[in-house]
Each structure stands twice: as structure tokens, then as C-alpha cells.
Image (spheres, rainbow, N blue to C red):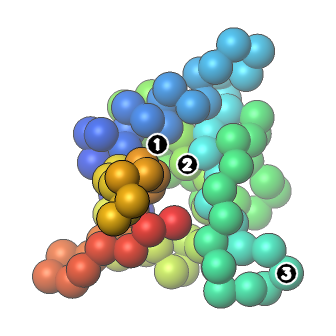
Amino acid sequence: MLTLTPTAIEVVRTLTHAEGMPEEAGLRIFTADDSATLQLAVAPVPAEQDQVVTAEGSRVFLDQQAAAFLDDKVLDTGQDPNGEGGFVISQQGQGVSGI
């Protein structure tokens, strides 16, 4: 199952606890049109078949393809070479990729 670092937990919590969002809101990671590209969106509730990952009050919703891909991964935050912040995924013993 996807694991979140403390930094990722805080960023997800900040994004999903914005004014007007329901308490059950989460960060949804999904694929569109069966593509291999992961997409992110803040969602008020999980989609019907989403897997829900909860960590210290932060919720992440994963569609079936994203859940399969991220099953043994860690979600963290970081900066790209241009200094832009974002989420990164890693696997123990391997490099990091941005999403």
C-alpha cells in the first residue's frame, strides 16, 4: 500500500482542508483514459472503486491503476531541477520520479 512521508501528509492535509472542502476530502491520484500518466486533483469524496489511504488525518484516493502502480511506493514532496515544488514517488533502493 502507498506510504506517505510526514511532509507529504502535511501537504495533502493543507490541500484538502481548504475552506469549503468537506472533512472527507482527499487528494485523488488517478489515470485518465487508461493512460500511463498519473494525475492529481483534490476531491470531496473518493470515486466508487477508489482505494483510500489514510495517514494522520490526510486522505489519498487511488483509482485502480494508480493503486496497482503505487502499491509499494512512498509519496513525498520535493523540488525539481528548476526549484518547482511538487509530489515525488520513490521506492526503496530506487530513484525518485515526480508526479
State the residue lying farthest toward the right: 33
Structural crowding at the residue carrying mark 2, measured as other residues with C-alpha within 10 Å and reported as few (<14), some (14–19) or many (≥20): many
Name which residue type carries label 1.
Answer: Thr
Could you tell whether 9 is left or right of 25 in the image?
left
Quote the CA–CA distance across marks 2 and 3.
Answer: 20 Å
Q: Toward the viewer: 98 or 49?
A: 98
Image quadrant of residue 37? Answer: bottom right
Name which residue type carries label 3.
Answer: Asp
State the mark number for residue 60.
2
Name which residue type carries label 2.
Answer: Val
State the residue lying farthest toward the top: 19
> Which element carries disc 3, helix, strand or loop?
loop
Q: Toward the viewer: 58 or 81?
A: 81
Closer to viewer: mark 2 or mark 3: 3
Q: Position of residue 32 (x, y in %)?
A: 80, 74
Closer to viewer: mark 1 or mark 2: 2
Quote the CA–CA distance across marks 1 and 2.
Answer: 6 Å
Could you tell whether 36 is left or right of 53 in the image?
right
Q: Answer above or below: position of 6 versus 5.
A: above
Q: Is the C-beta separation of discs 2 and 3 under 8 Å?
A: no
Looking at marks 1 and 2 on the same chain, the residue that comes earlier in the sequence is marked by 1
Q: Position of residue 73 (x, y in %)?
A: 35, 71
Q: Which residue is mark 3?
A: 33
Structural crowding at the residue carrying mark 3, measured as other residues with C-alpha within 10 Å and reported as few (<14), some (14–19) or many (≥20): few
Quarter of the rendering occupied by the N terminus: bottom left
> Which element carries disc 2, helix, strand or loop?
strand
Q: Is the C-beta separation of discs 1 and 3 under 8 Å?
A: no
